[in-house]
Amino acid sequence: MFKKSVNEFMNYIPFLKEIVKRDFKKKYYKSVLGVAWSMLSPLLMMVVMSILFSTVFKRSIPYYPVYWFSGNLFFTFVTQGSHMAMNSMITNSSLIKKMKIPNYFFCISKVTLELVMSLFSLIPYFIVGFILKVPFNFNALLFFVPIFYTYIFTIGLGMFLCAYATFLRDLEYLYSVVRRMWMYITPIFYPIDIVPTQFRFLWELNPIYVYLSIFRDMTINGVMPSERSLIIATCYSIITLVLGIVTFKEKEERFFLYI
């Protein structure tokens, strides 16, 4: 069964590439700036947030602009990618009815598109880091490790949400509220040190915080993350992916009745 699933996945890789290309072109259709906007937008926000908060957290957060940039990058990756995957059955309903393709590929394609956009955002991230003289070292070359963890986690989360959002359209609005709450319990613009020690474990239960901390350790602090952090990140990614796949497969047969 596992071997069959792997073979099926590999056979449809070309389709995944094509649908990601389609969504990429559609996203920037008639856009003047095009891909440049994916790099310019976080840069502009970084400037605004740095003006607002860099003075407040100047002592506790060195290189504040890249600190905020990294937090925004990971939070946007997870929440935007999972949100698009959540609606993937509905937005691709016409194609699903015409072609016999594993439905989960539409979830993966949405998250993969957001991955591509995040990789583009890394270009200004490292440029700003270079300008601010962030001491990048060999560890920074491993930046793809936490990004891979985040990619797997987001696919699992997106599939889980899609399994229910296809039937419950109000879930999209509920998730918008959850995303807003999630933003405040993720240290995007503030240091984790301001959270009282007795409550800090709640932040450590946040997968985005775990992935983000690993990324910041590698690219800003210039150190390797602890084995504990890597183990927790691995567990979050695998468990969420398995949960997403199982839930998606369980609900999949009823999708055609609602799209």
Image (tube, rainbow, N blue to C red):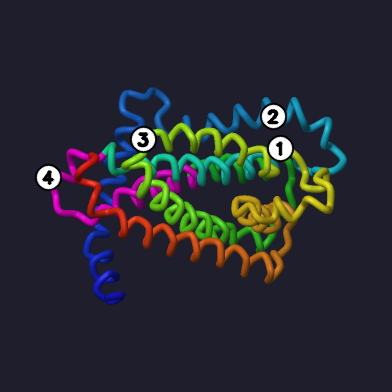
Mark 1 or 3: in front is 3
Residue type at tag 3? Arg
Q: Residues within 10 Å of mark 4 (few under 14, many from 20)?
A: few
Q: Give the residue number, with chain letter if any, for mark 4.
A: 98
Span shown in magenta: 92-119
Q: Give the residue number, with chain letter if any, for mark 1.
A: 189
Residue type at tag 2? Met
Q: Give the residue number, with chain letter if any, for mark 2.
A: 49
**Residue at (64%, 40%) from the top-left corner?**
69
Tell me whether circle 3 and circle 2 mark residues in contact (CB < 8 Å).
no
Vertical arrangement, residue 196 with respect to residue 242, above or below: above
What's the CA distance linking mark 1 and mark 2?
8 Å
Q: Residues within 10 Å of mark 3 (few under 14, many from 20)?
A: few
**Residue at (65%, 32%) from the top-left corner?**
46
What secondary structure is found at the residue carrying circle 3? loop
Residue type at tag 4? Lys
* Residue closer to the observer: 237 or 57: 237
Question: Is residue 206 covered in magenta?
Answer: no
Percent x, y of residue 152: 46, 58
